[in-house]
Amino acid sequence: MTGVIDHWSKDVEYDLDDVALRIRRRVLDMCLGRGQGYAGQGLALADVFAHLYFRVMRRNPDGSLLDRFVLSTGHSAIALFATLGELGVYEEEELRTYGQAGSRIEESPLEGTPGFEITGGSLGQGLSQAVGMALGERLRGSGAKVYCLLSDGELQEGQVWEAAMSASHHHLDNLVAIVDNNHMQADGAPAQVMEVEPVVERLAAFGFVAERIDGHDHEALRRVLPHASVAQHGPVAIVLETVPGKGVETFEHHHKVHYLRLTRDVWDEAIAELG
Amino acid sequence: MTDTAAGSVKLERTNVRSIARAPLVEAPFATTVVELGRERPDIVVLSADLSKYTDIHPFAETFPERFFQLGMAEQNMMGVAGGLAKTGFCPIAVTYTVFATRRAGDQVQMALATGHRTAVIAAFLPGITTPFRASHQGTDDLAIMRAIPGMTVIDPMDATELSAALRAAVSVPGPVYLRGLRASVAEVLVPPYEFEIGRARLLREGSDVGLVGTGLGTQWALEAAELLETRGTSAAVLHVPTIKPFDTTAVVEFASHFRALVSVENHSVVGGLGSAVCEAVAGAGMACRVRRCGVPDRWADAGPLDFIRERLGLDGPSLATSVVDNQEAAR
């Protein structure tokens, strides 16, 4: 998030359960404008984003982020926008223009949008850029770590494995791949579309120190991030078991949770359910 | 044609040697990359298992910490280049034309072209400079790269220009696609020669017919022009090394002196120099008959360069005939 100023403070002890809840509220609030959006992904990723941006990623003395975040799964941008909203990078009013014509709060934004380091969305490409950043930060001697979020569906793209191979070949111990294992892609579950499991074993075979955790278990998130990133001479992968729509029960069981297009009363009920 | 101004543009002639007398020199890519590495600590070089065949092995040996071997994986290499660019480095990603533009086309666009950071894709085996047919002959790369917003596209014509263009490329605020030449290359442009991105060069004055070339195609155009001269036809040659941004002003000015133009390129006649020339003259509302000489819309032949050129009508005598035919047709 080079050059982006936010309102994070080192003097505040953030309650990450509360931060995650507020990110979830923002995700739903962002979808109200058009009555649609990638709310399922936003709700699924609220917990890990709360940890990354409010606890894990380190800061420079001026408050800017030292560590870098790469969002490969472009349509999960809603989670990052909501988190950046929590950090004061975006105003609530602008976030409500999510996906609207002419808005910079795009459903799958290009690099250069504040907080977005790369152009995601053409899936399977983010890890390669994260590898490049990890090589670059190591060469600079900055000490920065690079966190890359990708999804289980993206693992079907061959480039992900090219990137994984290069991460271990170049001993990138400053790279952390976070796989959003949400068991959901456009045509259904990966198990039916194209099996990606066993994800942990496959990443381990490509040289990652890999571990699977419940992506909504804050204790587990606290344990693996950033402790897992002090791996020995190689990259780390954290496979998050997430539930699309997490926190809103009707969404968790919605057959079109990949992209929700709902009436206003359903959105209102969801917001009420979050509390 | 003379170099006097017509309209507001004046085309000054750039010094070239006769093609027949131009010396062959070792391609200067390797030495230039090493020089740049010395001058610029931000220069990093990436290879996808072709460092020995794309003249970057000397850089790898001189600056091992700034050389990144990515193995036979061009898609990942372009992404890695994008990441390095975003951490403040100037990546030079080096491979063959076909792999850079076909295999890793989306990665070039997403990782290198949606932002404004400097990055150079240096692509060897341009056009028909390799005997391996469809798999290795990059005959569509200029067309593909030219369609990418913000991409600078350069096809150097000789050793002098290859070195100068690489030097210019690493300072462009955005991605650059540069065709590379290896092994023995003619030195046609007389040093000192400064490459200017987006500037076409008048290499030869002539009053009867006009040829427009890029890359090795410019050497072939000069061959044809020299041949025509012996037959009493005065041929002018305009060299357009930067395919994008295209020097529309110079091409239009050049075209204004002739009823017919012939474009010559080491590339398909679809989407490259010839197409750009047609766009320029048509866009200016000119009545100019343009004949596009290059690889026809089919896979080129296998064999040595001279053999393929003859097969495709790109040798000097065939091009000279095309120029005369086109001129006759325009009467």
Image (tube, coloured by chain):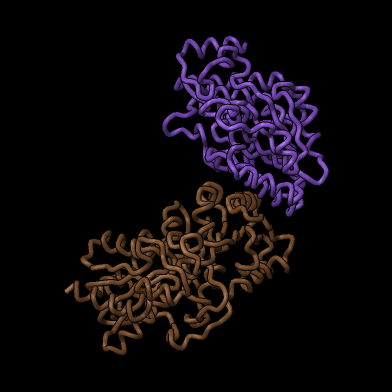
**In this view, B59 is above or below A31:** below
Judge whether B35 appears above or below B139 on screen: below
Percent position (x, y) of residue B114? 51, 47
Image coords of residue A154 (percent x, y): 59, 36
Residue B129 vertical position relative to residue B142 in the rendered view, above or below: below
Q: Quadrant of residue B146?
A: bottom left
Between A193 and B226, the one nearer to me in the picture: A193
Screen quadrant of the N terminus of chain A: top right
Q: Identify the chain drawn in purple.
A: A
Kindly identify the residue that appears in the image at 65 percent across and 18 percent down. Answer: A21
Viewer-nearest residue: B269 or A139: B269
| Chain B drawing hue | brown
Which residue corresponds to the image point at 47% horizontal and 81% vertical from the top-left?
A: B188
Q: Nearer the viewer, residue A256 or A245?
A: A256
The image position of residue A179, as x and y in percent, is 67, 33
Q: Nearer the viewer, residue A181 or B251?
A: A181
